[in-house]
């Protein structure tokens, strides 16, 4: 019988948590697109308020949960100080790049395309980076999946030349965002080997570093929303900080205690799908046939990559067959 993770969270509830988190993430870009229309805020200021507001809420929720569960008396997992500081700083900087470039992509090329390219290219860059930096093998299925994802990106780029649905500047920002996501994941994976790290504490630390990095840049760009529709802007900022940031990340990490990472990565494809639906139905974005084709190819390739990863994990977990007859 398969052992349940130490959190004792039922698998069904874990799947629900990850699904909600992925859906909520898809709404962050939509809220940003609405803010661009009247707040006067740019991508850097938006990302600062998201990380800073999310940080405050995560700290409050963590303190409340530890008080209720009595976990404050349990020693924190041991991790060498130098490794913890390095991982937190690098992850925080990568998080700032990931989020700011994503909001810039939404501003430049729209919610649907910006989200699809960011979330589609991220797993591909992670797979390639893991192969280069940690020697993780892709295998035949992984190579085909990466090739399929690149083909989907090529269709998006070539198909965007005839219409306004895809803009090269936006694609560049989306790829930069995906690179930040990949760097964040690879650093966490590499420096987190051997255990001893608290994922919630790591997330809070990364958010704090990201907010500090973004504050001076956001101040130059324009930190405060304009007076027109100020109430609407504050509501949208509060939503971004609370739902697709603090709540979604909290539920995602809780769900990972019961759901395999490969399964979670497939469920996370809900994010670009939900973003595309919101963009078409509520924001008036139009998707060309080439955009739809490229999106489909890209998402299918990422799903195939996750399936390949899951099969590889199962194979690695099997005991080796004894040598000889």
Image (cartoon, rainbow, N blue to C red):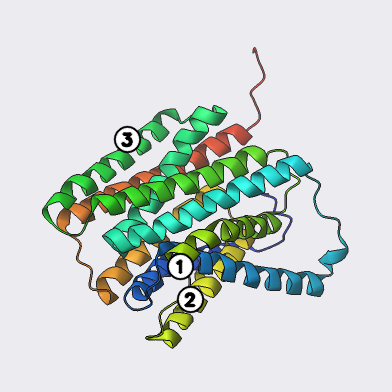
The quadrant where residue 256 appears: bottom right
Contact check, label 1 and label 2, Cβ < 8 Å: yes
Q: Secondary structure at mark 3?
A: helix
Q: Which residue is mark 3?
A: 147
Q: Position of residue 72 (x, y in %)?
A: 84, 65
Above or below, 34 relative to 267: below
- The first of marks 1 and 3 along the sequence is 1
Q: Which residue is mark 1?
A: 46
Q: Position of residue 1 (x, y in %)?
A: 68, 49
> What residue do we see at 62% from left, 59% from top?
253
Mark 1–mark 3 Cα distance, whole angstroms, equals 34 Å
Q: Nearer the viewer, mark 2 or mark 3?
A: 2
Mark 2–mark 3 Cα distance, whole angstroms, equals 38 Å
- The first of marks 1 and 2 along the sequence is 1
Above or below, 178 relative to 130: below
Disc on res. 237: 2
Mark 1–mark 2 Cα distance, whole angstroms, equals 8 Å
> What residue do we see at 78% from left, 44% from top?
79
Label 3 neighbour load within 10 Å: few <14, some 14-19, many 20+: some
Determine the residue located farthest toward the top in the rendered image. Answer: 324
Determine the residue located farthest toward the front in the rendered image. Answer: 220
> What residue do we see at 38% from left, 77% from top?
39
């Amino acid at each position: 019988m398969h052992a349940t993770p130490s959190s004792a969270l039922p698998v069904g509830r874990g799947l629900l948590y990850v699904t909600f988190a992925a859906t909520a993430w898809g709404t962050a870009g939509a809220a940003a697109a609405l803010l661009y229309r009247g707040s006067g805020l740019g991508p850097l200021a938006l990302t600062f308020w998201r990380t800073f507001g999310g940080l405050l809420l995560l700290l409050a929720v963590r303190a409340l949960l530890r008080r209720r569960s009595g976990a404050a008396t349990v020693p924190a997992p041991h991790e060498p100080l130098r490794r913890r500081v390095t991982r937190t700083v690098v992850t925080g900087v990568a998080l700032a790049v990931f989020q700011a470039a994503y909001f810039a992509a939404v501003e430049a090329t729209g919610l649907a395309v910006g989200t699809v390219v960011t979330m589609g290219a991220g797993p591909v860059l992670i797979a390639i980076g893991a192969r280069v930096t940690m020697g993780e093998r892709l295998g035949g299925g992984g190579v085909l999946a990466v090739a399929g994802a690149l083909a989907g990106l090529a269709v998006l780029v070539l198909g965007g030349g005839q219409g306004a649905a895809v803009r090269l500047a936006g694609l560049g920002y989306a790829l930069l965002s995906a690179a930040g996501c990949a760097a964040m994941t690879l650093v966490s994976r590499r420096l987190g080997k051997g255990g001893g790290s608290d994922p919630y504490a790591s997330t809070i630390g990364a958010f704090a570093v990201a907010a500090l990095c973004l504050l001076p840049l956001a101040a130059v760009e324009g930190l405060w929303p304009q007076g027109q529709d100020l109430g609407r802007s504050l509501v949208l900022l509060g939503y971004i900080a609370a739902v697709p940031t603090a709540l979604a990340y909290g539920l995602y990490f809780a769900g990972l205690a019961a759901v395999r990472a490969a399964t979670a990565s497939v469920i996370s494809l809900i994010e670009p799908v939900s973003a595309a639906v919101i963009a078409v139905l509520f924001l008036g974005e139009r998707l060309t046939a080439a955009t739809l084709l490229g999106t489909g190819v890209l998402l299918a390739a990422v799903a195939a990559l996750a399936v390949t990863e899951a099969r590889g994990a199962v194979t690695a977990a099997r005991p080796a067959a004894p040598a000889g007859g």
